[in-house]
Image (cartoon, grey):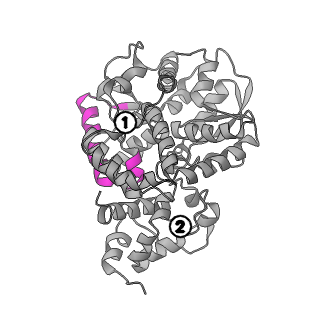
């Protein structure tokens, strides 16, 4: 039996309304990735994470809980859970991820920032002022709350005099570049993904990869934002030979992640199908979205045949000798 | 028997955010869906266009199962904004039925 859609989306909506995020996240956890990097505060150009990588440890933990509730009596208690969540942060009692998981996702953001710096890109960071963009609720059609969140994000960017952002994931890129302009009059932010920036400015690799990588395009990058050539150009500069699966570029196959919170079993089925398609072309697979990496990695681990899923920045870090 | 609801047609089908009238029922969308959703978008959008609100709401699980991956839109010869239409239906259900 499926989880109660209204309750699951309701909890996320209540959290965004009350706690400014679908899963509450402290300022300390939001900004921990930048510790010691000495990124300037603010500036006309800033890196904008949209908190998606920082949310991943919480999302992975909750996804496991939701999967266990899907066919159990626990799904009947989600109404009570939503009621309780109006007063206390229920997610805090559902078991957080291990410190190593937080470290892993922070490392990805640190390496993105370091590679941009190494490529000569100058940018600041908004630290605790940076807000989640509302992407999960936008997907689920809670538009009135997303519009409010869009205005909050825009107010923060304007207050800090930000003219351009460099994003770190496809969903935040889509929200800031394509969704918010439809919601806010006079919105004129320049938005580029770090992969688009690196495609222009990244130097040749110091430690060329000299290996084949099967590429998994994110639906959001490929079909919503037309970011298809750039990851390939960046990987080529890094010395990788990009292997194209049957479904690639504009015709990429979804990882299943978008419905993970509502229909875990269906989501896993799509992920398993996608990993099978990719693994036909090689065991080293690269993806460029935290949700894709999570969904595909979970499916790959079940295969137990050596198929590995890595975030594209893991490969780039190796090529440019960065590991923070 | 299902009641045809003119208010539903006005609220969803006639809004700027919903375009399904151009759908020619070719089935490309269904054939290319990674989720294997048979109902979306052909039958579902037809329910909307003719005002069968009850049929739409009875299929809420399908509406929320859509990945919004736009694979269907790549093969749609009529340029129907399928993912946008699904979001519009979610928004309608969230507001009227889920009170979000």
Residue B58's tag is: none
CB contact under 8 Å: marks 2 and 1 = no
Q: Chain of mark 2?
A: B
Q: Is residue A190 above or below residue A179?
A: above
Q: Give whichever of B50, A68 is nearer the camera.
A: A68
Q: Give whichever of A17, A47 is nearer the camera.
A: A17
Q: Position of residue A18 (x, y in %)?
A: 25, 42
Looking at the image, the residue that sits furthest to the front is A73
Q: Is residue B75 above or below residue B26?
A: above
The residue mark sitting in front, 2 or 1, is 1
Looking at the image, the residue that sits furthest to the bottom is B1
Residue A178 visible in the snapshot: yes
In the visual, does A217 lie left or right of A194? right
Residue A126 visible in the snapshot: no
Q: Where on the picture, by quarter, is residue B71?
A: bottom right
Mark 2 element type: loop
Q: Position of residue A177 (x, y in %)?
A: 40, 42
Count residues near mark 2 (Cα–Cα under 10 Å), then give few for <14, some for 14-19, many for 20+: many
Residue B40's tag is: 2
Magenta-colored span: A136-164
Residue that badge 1 annotates? A93
Report the residue at 56% width, 37% height from top. A294
Count residues near mark 1 (Cα–Cα under 10 Å), then give few for <14, some for 14-19, many for 20+: few
Mark 1 element type: helix
Mainly helix, strand or loop, the magenta region? Answer: helix
Q: Position of residue A20 (x, y in %)?
A: 29, 39
Q: Where on the picture, by quarter, is residue B9?
A: bottom left
Q: Is residue A211 above or below residue A223?
A: above
Report the residue at 63% width, 41% height from top. A216
Q: Is residue A190 magenta?
A: no
* C-alpha gap between disc 2 and disc 1: 37 Å
Report the residue at 67% width, 40% height from top. A302
């Amino acid at each position: 039996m499926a989880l109660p859609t209204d309750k699951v989306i309701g909890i996320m909506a209540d959290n965004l309304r009350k706690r400014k995020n679908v899963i509450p996240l402290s300022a300390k956890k939001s900004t921990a990735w930048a510790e010691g990097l000495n990124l300037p505060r603010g500036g006309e150009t800033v890196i904008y994470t949209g908190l998606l990588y920082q949310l991943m440890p919480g999302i992975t933990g909750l996804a496991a809980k939701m999967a266990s509730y899907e066919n159990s009596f626990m799904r009947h208690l989600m109404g009570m859970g939503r009621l309780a969540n109006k007063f206390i942060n229920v997610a805090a009692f559902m078991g957080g991820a291990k410190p190593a998981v937080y470290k892993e996702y922070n490392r990805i953001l640190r390496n993105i920032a370091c590679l941009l710096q190494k490529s000569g890109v100058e940018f600041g960071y908004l630290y605790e002022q940076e807000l989640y963009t509302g992407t999960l609720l936008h997907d689920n059609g809670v538009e009135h709350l997303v519009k409010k969140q869009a205005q909050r994000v825009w107010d923060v960017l304007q207050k800090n005099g930000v003219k351009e952002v460099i994003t770190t994931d496809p969903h935040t890129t889509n929200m800031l570049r394509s969704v918010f302009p439809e919601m806010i009059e006079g919105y004129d932010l320049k938005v580029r993904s770090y992969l688009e920036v690196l495609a222009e400015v990244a130097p040749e690799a110091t430690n060329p990869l000299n290996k084949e990588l099967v590429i998994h395009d994110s639906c959001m990058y490929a079909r919503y934002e037309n970011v298809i050539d750039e990851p390939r150009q960046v990987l080529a500069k890094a010395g990788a030979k990009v292997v194209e699966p049957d479904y690639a570029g504009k015709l990429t196959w979804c990882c299943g992640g978008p419905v993970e919170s509502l229909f875990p079993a269906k989501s896993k089925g799509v992920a398993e199908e996608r990993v099978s398609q990719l693994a036909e072309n090689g065991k080293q697979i690269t993806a460029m979205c935290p949700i894709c990496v999570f969904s595909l990695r979970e499916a790959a681990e079940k295969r137990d045949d050596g198929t590995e899923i890595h975030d594209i920045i893991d490969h780039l870090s190796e090529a440019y000798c960065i590991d923070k | 028997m299902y009641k045809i609801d003119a208010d539903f047609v006005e609220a969803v089908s006639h809004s700027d955010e919903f375009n399904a009238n151009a759908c020619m029922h070719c089935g490309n969308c269904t054939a290319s869906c990674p989720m294997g959703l048979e109902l979306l978008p052909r039958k579902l959008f037809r329910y909307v266009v003719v005002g069968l609100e009850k049929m739409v709401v009875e299929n809420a699980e399908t509406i929320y199962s859509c990945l919004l991956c736009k694979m269907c839109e790549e093969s749609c010869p009529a340029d129907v904004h399928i993912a946008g239409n699904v979001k519009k239906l979610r928004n309608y259900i969230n507001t009227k039925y889920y009170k979000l």
